[in-house]
Each structure stands twice: as structure tokens, then as C-alpha cells.
Amino acid sequence: MTDRSDDISSRRAFLKGTIAAGGAIAGASMAGASTPDPLITEVQPWASAFGDGVDATPYGMPIKFESDVVRRNVEWLTADTTSSINFTPIHALDGTITPQGCAFERHHSGAIELSKSDYRLMINGLVDTPLVFSYADLERFPRVTRTFFCECAANTGMEWAGAQLNGAQFTHGMIHNMEYTGVTLRTLLEEAGLTAAGDLKDKWVFVEGADASSNGRSIPMEKALDDCMIAFKANGEALRKEHGYPVRLIVPGWEGNMWVKWLRRIEVTGQAIESREETSKYTDTLDNGVSRKWTWVMDAKSVVTSPSPQAPITHGKGPLVITGLAWSGRGAITRVDVSTDGGKNWQTARLAAPGTDKALTRFYLDINWDGTDMLLQSRAMDSTGYVQPTKAELRAVRGLNSVYHNNCIQTWHVYPTGEAENVEVS
Ligand SMILES: Nc1nc2c(c(=O)[nH]1)N[C@H]1C(S)=C(S)[C@@H](COP(=O)(O)O)O[C@H]1N2
Ligand SMILES: [Mo]
């Protein structure tokens, strides 16, 4: 309680400070001003008639004024939309949970329609008893509910050579963060029995989906038994078709490609399968021609979501809320710093809530903007002590051939007009 009232009184002092400095309140207009505001003095249409009754929309959709908060793709990136990607409108969202309806989609052969009654999940290979589960079977195992981010390894991939795409949605929107409900992969593997697999240290599971691409990936047994989940609910409701209805795999902190949708088979194997998705794709070639192998983890990363190119400042100088997202595939976000001068000086941002493992963390920095140019950056730190690198630091290690796993510090140039642009400060 004391913390909260402290917050409020310091915010008041902050606003008062602005009045003293600028002679007018920024962020609020003075009650009792000389010209009457018809929005206050006149009876408005919405107060003169009834609104919609209940059941007008049995499943609610966002109000029409929010129609620009939608996923978007970048047409020139892919040849067609069935093997393509679109982007979460992170510039327009707040908090940490991504509504399914605007959570990015990545399909290799389109989103399929698979009913619960047609759904089958097979576990085979080096197990004591190969098993097939129906959807109803899965519902009878002890359940867990956990929140994790899912980031495509290609997120920010277009930015390696220089600033490319003008908007946080396009540079950083291949990410979503949902609360998943399902059964742990460990529970199902133990149901099939792992005695036949012998020493589990060098064992793997190969997971594949029911879509035409199947998107097969190998996962080390240690990870499979650690925190992977077979999810059938996201944010409290059934998974949407585009996110793998009725069942998808959750591989916390690891690249999105491993989060197999429409999961149909889990094979316990003695070695990695080295499928297309883990050899020619989702790997990065270094300057010396050698490709990095098994780059599963998504390292700590952050981005300022507002202000940003699609979320310019429209209110002029004075109090400004700078906000963004931070995440780490290795643990929890412990701190986020924000710079307004391209990384020369840093201020520690306020975390909306303490960071949790492998989930998005929201940060805020409340400043008094003087209306001059800013080079806005954010820098995340995680519970392993790792600090998000600059673009130059990342390039020094990875060269310029990489596409995937670009977690460098992003810069927005905010102009005195309030507009913002993606620029390179390495
Ligand atoms: N079966 C199947 N699973 C899949 C894919 C796919 O095309 N088919 N795409 C993968 C990739 S590359 C990513 S980044 C994530 C994206 O998950 P989303 O579409 O729910 O955002 O799903 C992964 N799982
Ligand atoms: Mo991906």
C-alpha cells in the first residue's frame, strides 16, 4: 500500500513539475476551462438509446475502433501465404499475454483443420509400450498451466545487415506469449515407459505434426523430460487452428520451430534425426563457412514497443511512457535498461512484474520528454547474468551470413515530431 501511494504522489509531483515548467498540464486538460466541451455538456447518442443486448456477439471480437490491431505479413518475404509468416502487432499491445487472435503465425504448408475426434498422438520408438492417445485420453492425465513465449528463430532476422523493416511488429513480431494448459511431455513419456531406452543421457525424441510439412524436429531427452508440454489450451480457451488445434508441443525458451503444431507423433530415438528443419534450415553459417549446430535456445532480447515507428508520439513534449518487452530462453528477465541517446547513457526501467522463466516481461520507463531527437534502445539482462548484445558485438561473433537468432539491441530514432524510424546504431 505505501509503495502504491508513493507512486501516486510522485506521479502528481511529476505532473505538477510539468505545469511549473511549461505553464500547462501535459497529459490532461484543465477542468472548468472557458470553452465548454460538448462531449461533457451535451447528451451523446450513446446515452440516448440502448446499446447492444447480451448475445449480440456470442463470441466477442475487438471493437471496430481497434481494427488496426491485427497480424500483418510482409508480402515480399515469401512466395505465397501457405509457407509464410505474419507478425504480432506488439507495438499496439500492452501487458504480457498475447491474445491468440493477433499472435503471429508461421506455417510451412498452411494451417490445417483437424478435429478433436480425428486427432491421434502416437508415442513409439525406444519405449516399453508404444501408445496412441486420443484427445479424450490426453484430458485424463494430470494437467499443468504455465506461461511461455514462443519466438521464431527468424525473428529480427532481416536486420542483420542494417535497419530493414519499419516497425516493431515487423522487426520483433515473430513472438507471442500465452498461458498454456496441457500435460507435461514427461508424463506421457513415462506412461509409455522409458526402461527400454536404457541410458537416457544420449536419447532424443523426434516430434512431428499432422500437416503436410510435418515440421519434424529432434529434441534431446533431457529437455523433453524437463519442461516440455503437450498443450491443448492457450489463454484459457482451445488453441486456435493456426496455433495447432487441437494439440501442440511447447518447448519453453527454445526456437519456435520446435513447437510442433497439430502434434501427431513422438518417437524416442538413439540419435537426432537431422531433419530438414534442423540442418539446411534454422541453422546459421559463420564467416568461416562452418554452420552452428543445435542452436535451440533463444537468448535474452528486448525491444521498445512504444514509441516506435507504428506507435509515434502524438502528444508532444512532457510526460512520456516508454514501454517494451523483454524475454530470455535461459531464465527470467531480471533487469531492463533504456537509453534515449543511442546507448551512451542508460536508465533502469520498471518491470511491470518480476520476470518469470521463459516468458515475456513488460517494462516501463516514465520520462519527461523535452521534445528533442531520441535514439531509443532497450537492453535486457537475465537470471544467468547475460546481457543483451549490441549489433556490433553480435556481428563480431556471428558474421553477416546469419538469418536466425538475432537478439541484438534495437534502435528507434524518435524525431521532434514524435515520429519514429528504424535506424542502425551498432
Ligand atoms: N506442424 C507444424 N508445426 C510448426 C510449424 C509448421 O509449419 N508445422 N511451424 C513452426 C515454426 S517455424 C514456428 S516459429 C512456430 C510458430 O507457431 P505459431 O504459428 O503458433 O506462431 O510453429 C512451429 N511449428
Ligand atoms: Mo519459425
Image (cartoon, rainbow, N blue to C red):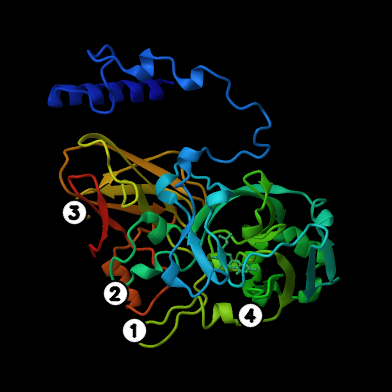
Residue 358 seen in the current view: no
Q: Quote the CA–CA distance across marks 4 and 2.
A: 30 Å
Spot occupied by residue 245 in the image (x, y as percentages of width and height): 69, 58
Label 4 sits on a secondary structure element that is loop
Disc assigned to residue 98:
none
Disc nearer the start of the sequence (3/4)? 4
Disc nearer the start of the sequence (1/3)? 1
Q: Please state which amino acid type lies under the numbered disc 3.
A: Lys
**Residue denoted by label 1:** 287
Relative to 294, say whether 70 is above or below. Answer: above
**Residue denoted by label 2:** 396
Q: Please state which amino acid type lies under the numbered disc 4.
A: Ala
Q: Within the image, what quadrant is residue 9 found in?
A: top left
Spot occupied by residue 412 in the image (x, y as percentages of width and height): 27, 54
Q: Quote the CA–CA distance across marks 1 and 3.
A: 29 Å
Mark 1 Cβ inside 8 Å of ligand 2: no
Q: Within the image, what quadrant is residue 111 found in?
A: bottom right
Disc assigned to residue 272:
4
Disc nearer the start of the sequence (4/2)? 4
Q: Please state which amino acid type lies under the numbered disc 2.
A: Ala
Q: In the image, what residue occupies the spot 61% across and 64% down?
A: 259
Image-based side of 40 in relation to 224, left or right: left
- Give yes or no for contact between labels 1 and 3 (Cβ–Cβ under 8 Å): no
Q: Within the image, what quadrant is residue 407 found in?
A: bottom left
Q: Quote the CA–CA distance across marks 1 and 2.
A: 10 Å
Relative to 63, say whether 102 is above or below. Answer: below
Relative to 388, say whether 349 is above or below. Answer: above
Disc assigned to residue 344:
3
Q: What is the crowding at mark 4: few (fewer than 14 residues within 10 Å), some, or many (at least 20)?
A: some
